[in-house]
Image (cartoon, rainbow, N blue to C red):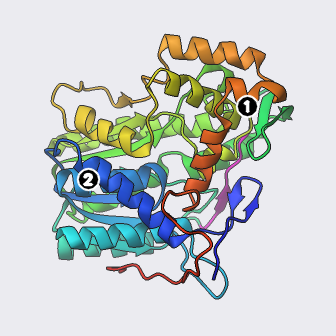
Amino acid sequence: MIIQPKTRGFICTTAHPEGCARQVQQQIDYVKAHKKLSGPVNVLVVGASTGYGLASRITAAFGAGANTIGVFFDKPAEGARTASAGWYNSAALEKAAAEQGLKSFSIVGDAFSDSIKTKTIDLIKAEFGTVDLVVYSVASPRRTHPVTGETFSSVIKPVGNAYTNKTMNFHSGEVSTVTIEPATEDEVRQTIAVMGGEDWGMWIDQLQAAGALAEGATTVAYSYIGPEVTHPIYKDGTIGQAKNDLEKTAIALNEKLSATNGRAFVSVNKALVTQSSSAIPVVPLYISALYRVMKDKELHENCIQQMYRLFAEHLYNSDAGSSHLIRIDDWEMREDVQAEVMKRWSEIETANVPVLADLPGYQDDFFNLFGFRTEGVDYEADTDPAVDIPNLV
């Protein structure tokens, strides 16, 4: 079939297998072109098929030569429907890992469930014995609690007061004003249940109880803080409440793991185009302006560059410090960068978006998420959407 992008708002409902595979290979090539990392050895990535989770798995496998297990919830192709991008990404990663002689396995299912945790632990014990790094990078709008059975849904809303600011339709470049009403107490509770630290803690507790965590194991989860202009909808909003819970979990896990010389971190990462960030009002306009400024200053990083720096300068660098919070958003939050972004923010409107922001860069990154706009891919060619994932458990 001829596979072209089909979009619905901030979602692309198709994905291209060759485009996804080429982008995975580009990330692998970047890591292999840099200095080999000193660790880890056996790695579990929960939420491993896209974005920072995928980049973490690639960095561990091809930067440190680690064996990896990736857990993700993606769907294969069915009839005229393509597989999800994460499925194609994982298929390409597994193929490359096998060619490199690395042990690598993929588990597809609901990471929030006890059954997937048990399946993963059984695989770790059978194939690796233990893991010495656990990356938690789950992004989901819903979660069913494995004990109570309650299903929670997250919302992207301010807390306390309504919030009004600029936003942008990243397909058209049209700048408008959006007002978002505040969340209810129950919406805050449910967002924390989905996006907070409880499930991360459950993973670590169950791995530890099963003897599947190595002595001195490290675990890291990902977060974002951002500039003041996005605080009402992010840092001080429902998402921020969940991220505060994530940080509390890191502190608790760090204390728990310290008995076996282990560590727990939250890494605060740079703003990048993801399916999640595309859904947050205000954020696409901010990222577009940020991209232009950081590219002009030669400071821009993508997912794989961020993750390589996280591993090389923080997780496996003895001089990286002891705080539970790692800031690899440091270049984004540099005073000169933020001053220029905010100057542009005050001036930006639909007519000057091409001058003040990097809308083409945003659009390219969005379509890249789904394997489109990838150099060297013939998007008019007949393409089989059915792709198997090697070592799918």
Foreground of the two, 77 or 4: 4
Check disc 1: other Cα within 10 Å, few if <14, some if 14-19, many if 20+: many
Q: Is residue 240 above or below residue 347?
A: below
Q: Which residue is mark 2?
A: 60
Q: Quadrant of the N terminus?
A: bottom right
Residue 281 percent location from the top left of the image: 74, 38
Q: Quadrant of the C terminus?
A: bottom left
- Residue 58 left/right relative to 23: left
Please tell me whether mark 1 sits on a helix, a strand or a loop.
loop
Residue at the far bottom in the pictured view: 79
Magenta span: predominant SS is: loop
Is residue 55 shown in magenta? no
Residue 226 percent location from the top left of the image: 56, 27
Is residue 154 shown in magenta? yes
- Residue 164 seen in the current view: no
Residue 178 percent location from the top left of the image: 85, 33
Q: Residue type at mark 2: give it.
A: Ala
The residue that appears at 24% across and 58% down in the rendered structure is: 61
- Give the residues in magenta: 149-158
- Residue 120 left/right relative to 138: left
Q: Residue type at mark 1: give it.
A: Val
The residue that appears at 38% across and 51% down in the rendered structure is: 55
Q: Which mark is residue 159?
A: 1
Residue 217 percent location from the top left of the image: 20, 49
